[in-house]
Image (cartoon, rainbow, N blue to C red):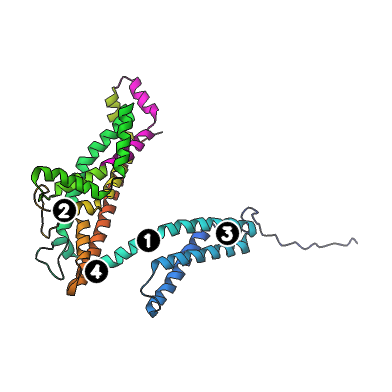
Amino acid sequence: MAATTTTATAAPRPLTNSYTAGKLPRWTPWVMLVGSWAVLIAVFAMLAASGATKGFNIVGAIFFGTVLFDVAIYATSLLVEGNRKAKDRLVTSLVVTAFIIALLPLISLGWTVVAQGLARFDITFFSESMRNVIGEGGGALHAIVGTLIITALTAIISVPIGLLTSIYLVEYGRGPLARAITFLVDVMTGIPSIVAGLFAYALFALIFGPAIRNGFMAAIALSVLMIPVVVRSSEEILRIVPNELREASLALGVPKWLTVVKVVLPTSLAGLVTGVMLAIARVIGETAPLLIVAGFTTSMNYNPFQDRMMALPVFVYTQYTQAAGLHAQASIDRAWTGALTLIIIVMLLNLIGRIVAKVFAPKYGR
C-alpha cells in the first residue's frame, strides 16, 4: 500500500510593491508642517496666557514651528526611508524654511495691522469724518473718498500716457529717440516721492500762487511716480507677445495700428492690467507728496480741483503724530484702522484687476 503524503498548504505572502515600500505618503510633509505650526502656536499661546511673554508672537510661532518641521521630517524620513532620502527631504525642508523666513516680515505686518486695526473697524469709522472731532469717535470717510478720487485721477492721467509710451517703444520706437525715452523712464523710476510732490507744487504755485492745495495737484504728483512704472511693466508685457501674431496680421494686409489694437493689446491684456494694478498699488500709499500738495483737512471734499483734500496715508500719518494727551489711544486706533483700510483697498483693486484680466483675456482653443 503506497504511502500518501499530505503537504500543508502554505499561507500566501502579502503582496508588496517594491516601488512604494519604505516611502512616506505624499501628504506627510504638509501634515507635519501644519502640525508643527499648531504645536508651536499652542505653546506660544500658553506662554502669552501665563504672562511669560508680552502678547502672542505669531512670527516666533511660525519660525520655531518651521524649525520643528525640519527636525521632524528628517527624523521620520530617516527611520522610514533611509539616510539618502532623509537628506533629500532635509534639504527640501530647508528651502521651504528659507521661503517662510522671507515671508515672516509680511506675516508680522499683516498680523499687527489686523490685530491693531480691528479696534475701530466699525460703521462709524466708514460713515463719518473727523470734522469737529477732538477725542474719541470720528471716522475716515473723508480720507477714503479723497484716496479714491486722487487715485482715480492719477490712473486716468498715467495709464494712457504709460501705455502709449510703451506701445511706441515696442512697436515703433527705433534710434536715438527711443533710447532717450527709455533712459528718461529709467531715471523717473528712481525719483524720490518728495521730489514729485515738490515738482507739482512748484508747477501750480507759479500759476495760482503759493497757497494752492487740492486733489488734482496730488494726482499730478502721483502721476510722475506712476507713469514710469506703467511704461516699464507694459513694455515688458508687450515684448512677450509672439512676433508671429504680428506677422500673420500684417500678411493679411491689416495696417500696423490696427494690428496693435486688435492683436497685440488683446493678447497682452491680462499682463497689462496686472502692471497697472501694481502701479496703482505703488502710488496709493504715498504720503510725502500728498502732505505738500493735497494738504490736510478734517472735512469732506468731493471736488479735487478746489480746496484741500485728505487721503488715507496722510490721515494715518496725522493721527499717529498727533496722538497726545488724554485721547492719544483714540488717535492711534484710528491710525491703525486707516492702515488696515488702505491695505484692504489695495487688495480689492488687485482682485478686481485679476478678474478683469481673466474675463477679457483672449480665449485660445485647440
Tag 3–tag 1 contact (CB < 8 Å):
no
Q: Residues within 10 Å of mark 1 (few under 14, many from 20)?
A: some
Q: Which mark is residue 119?
A: 4
Where disc 1 sits, the SS reads helix
Q: Residue at x 12, y 43 (%)?
A: 206
Check if residue 237 falls in the magenta segment.
Answer: yes
Q: Which residue is mark 1?
A: 107
Q: Nearer the viewer, residue 220 or 192?
A: 192
Mark 1 vs mark 2, CA separation in Å: 29 Å
Q: Which residue is mark 3?
A: 24
- Tell me where residue 5 sits by quadrant: bottom right
Percent x, y of residue 51: 38, 79
Position of residue 177 relative to residue 20, above or below, is above
Q: Which image quarter holds the N terminus?
A: bottom right
Q: Work out whether mark 3 precedes mark 4 in sequence or the reverse, and give the earlier one.
A: 3
Where disc 2 sits, the SS reads helix
Percent x, y of residue 60: 42, 67
Under mark 3, the amino acid is Leu
3 or 1: mark nearer the eye: 1
Tag 3–tag 2 contact (CB < 8 Å):
no
